[in-house]
Image (tube, rainbow, N blue to C red):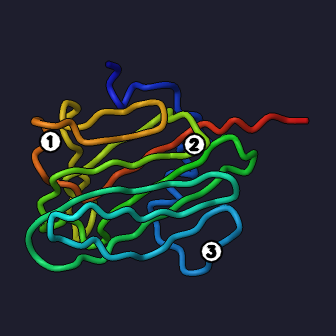
Amino acid sequence: MESPKTRGVVSLSALLVLVSLCVPVSASSDRTKTVEFNVKPGGVVHTFSQEMGEYECLFTYASQGGTNEQWLMSVGLSDDDRLFSCSVWRPQGKSYLFFTQFKAELKGTKIEYANAYSQTAAAGQSDVPLKPEEFTVGDSTVTHTSGKFNAQLSKLTAIGRTQHDEL
């Protein structure tokens, strides 16, 4: 299995979309959207999703401990409609919930880049990526690796190439 960090070549426009998605926007454009949602503990499987045109990002998870946490999901399309991005994160930095599972699915795309983090950059802290063996990147999904995931998740990002063709 390829490392999530080396899977495919990430173009400059993909990185620009990713950077724009990591910063919450107060006024959404028609190319990006950021939405707040609650991550709920209790061990029950929950799914939160957002669409952008014909593409969709679904975040499915189960977690334990604590109380609800406010998280953000950003989705966006590159100007040429060839890249669809999804970021899910806790803006306060580190989640205090223990995740028993997680999966992000990008519908209508093939993932070219993905990474997951146990801590996000907030309050002077840096992003702390999960170990590569803790999660698996497939063609359209990023998911925890059973038996190797250490139950800490605070951020997940994925960029997929769309099937968009010029006429």
Classify mark 2: residues with Cα within 10 Å, few (<14), some (14-19) or many (20+). many
Q: Which of the marked residues, 2 or 1, is nearer the chain's N terminus?
A: 2
Percent of width and height locating residue 61: 28, 57
**Which disc number belongs to residue 149?**
1
Percent of width and height locating residue 5: 36, 31
For the residue marked with disc 1, what is the amino acid? Phe
Residue appearing at x 12%, y 68% in the figure: 96
Image height check: is 139 above or below 114? Answer: above
Q: Secondary structure at mark 1?
A: loop
Q: Determine whether, in the image, residue 71 is placed left or right of residue 113.
A: left
For the residue marked with disc 3, what is the amino acid? Ser
Pointer 1 with pointer 3, Cβ within 8 A: no
For the residue marked with disc 2, what is the amino acid? Ala
Percent of width and height locating residue 129: 23, 44
Q: Secondary structure at mark 3?
A: loop
Q: Which of the marked residues, 1 or 3, is nearer the chain's N terminus?
A: 3
Label 2 and label 3: CA atoms lie apart by: 19 Å
Most extreme residue toward the front is: 44
Residue denoted by label 2? 14
Most extreme residue toward the top is: 1
- Picture quarter with the C terminus: top right
Pointer 2 with pointer 1, Cβ within 8 A: no
Percent of width and height locating residue 4: 35, 31
State the residue in front, 38 or 16: 38
Label 1 and label 3: CA atoms lie apart by: 34 Å
Q: Which of the marked residues, 2 or 3, is nearer the chain's N terminus?
A: 2
Residue appearing at x 65%, y 53% in the figure: 77
State the residue in front, 79 or 12: 79
Residue denoted by label 3? 28
> Which of labels 2 and 1 is toward the front?
1
> Which image quadrant is residue 76 in?
bottom right
